[in-house]
């Protein structure tokens, strides 16, 4: 591919990726904040807000009102993930950044196969963990998730270039976030809507599970954003002697930051 065309594709896809991500994560954090406010007895079931030239009163309902348009938020997640995968192909698969120069244990084809296979595997492990009895203890499941991420980081650094290893940890978390939306949150929402429209009482366990996966997304996104920025700071991040420990620490710092944000 001509270099100029490759660069323009990179710019356009990256622009799309960042903007779609802003829309997706902005909505996720907004609804997280809104849900917390509407769960506060002092708000009396309704939140008043001001933005631009208007005032808005928002109330939470357990079922959709008959005959009213129901707005879904899903395509932002799909566009963010799809543009991210295209960037992965352009920058790493085609851009010569997958393997460490002169010191690679894999061929490029093998590295790409590992990359492709890792995404569904990560989803299967993550989803199984959070549907298993271990998830009855949120703290235990979170610790296991963290240790698996750290182990994955270390393992990827052994076989890919350090920069590619960092980025693949971000791609894994981004894939988990998008899969949460399309495979757990949206199906639960559709079942809740269908049940409510049939006149039955919606299963609140579905709402709880969907809310949990949305909560996970608010935690994962902060380390993902850091990883997106890490390529600009190679000395302090992936190029450092203790690169895998640095990423492990920053993932944990991102989760702590997300916890604080969710509380305020």
Image (spheres, rainbow, N blue to C red):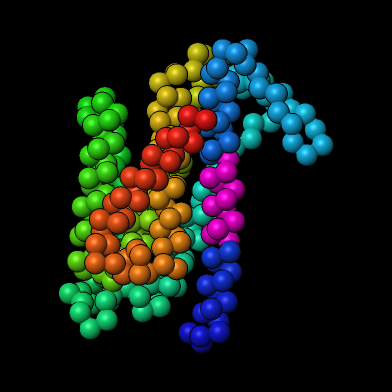
Residue at image point 74% right, 28% down = 56
Residue at image point 24% right, 62% down = 242
Residue 183 lies within the magenta run: no
Give the percent coordinates (x, y) of residue 64: 61, 22
> Which stretch is magenta?
16-27
Residue 21 lies within the magenta run: yes
The image shows a total of numbered marks equal to: 0
Find residue 137 and report its image quarter.
top left
Residue at image point 42% right, 35% down = 259
Give the percent coordinates (x, y) of residue 59: 65, 20
- In this rendering, position of residue 41 left or right of residue 205: right
Residue 163 visible in the shown view:
no
Residue at image point 58% right, 40% down = 27
- Which residue occupies the foreground of this view, 158 or 62? 158
Against 3, residue 37 (above or below) is: above
Give the percent coordinates (x, y) of residue 36: 53, 24
For the view shown, which residue lies furthest in the right direction? Answer: 53
Dominant SS in magenta: helix
């Amino acid at each position: 591919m001509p270099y100029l065309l490759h660069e323009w594709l990179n710019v356009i896809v990256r622009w799309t990726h960042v903007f779609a991500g802003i829309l997706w994560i902005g909505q996720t954090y907004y609804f997280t904040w809104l849900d917390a406010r509407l769960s506060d007895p002092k708000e009396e079931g309704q939140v008043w807000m001001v933005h631009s030239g208007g005032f808005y009163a928002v109330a939470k309902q357990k079922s959709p009102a008959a005959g009213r348009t129901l707005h879904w938020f899903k395509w932002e997640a799909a566009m963010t993930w799809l543009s991210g995968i295209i960037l992965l192909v352009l920058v790493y698969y085609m851009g010569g950044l997958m393997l460490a120069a002169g010191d690679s244990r894999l061929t490029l084809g093998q590295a790409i196969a590992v990359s492709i296979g890792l995404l569904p595997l990560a989803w299967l492990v993550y989803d199984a963990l959070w549907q298993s009895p271990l998830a009855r203890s949120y703290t235990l499941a979170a610790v296991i998730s963290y240790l698996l991420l750290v182990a994955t980081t270390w393992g990827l650094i052994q076989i890919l270039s350090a920069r590619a290893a960092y980025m693949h940890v971000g791609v894994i978390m981004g894939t988990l976030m998008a899969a949460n939306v399309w495979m757990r949150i949206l199906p639960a929402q559709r079942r809740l809507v269908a049940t409510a429209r049939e006149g039955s009482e919606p299963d609140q366990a579905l709402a709880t599970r969907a809310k949990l996966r949305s909560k996970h997304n608010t935690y994962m996104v902060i380390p993902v954003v850091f990883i997106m920025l890490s390529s600009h700071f190679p000395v302090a991040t992936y190029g450092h002697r203790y690169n895998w420990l640095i990423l492990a620490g920053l993932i944990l710092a991102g989760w702590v930051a997300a916890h604080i944000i969710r509380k305020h």
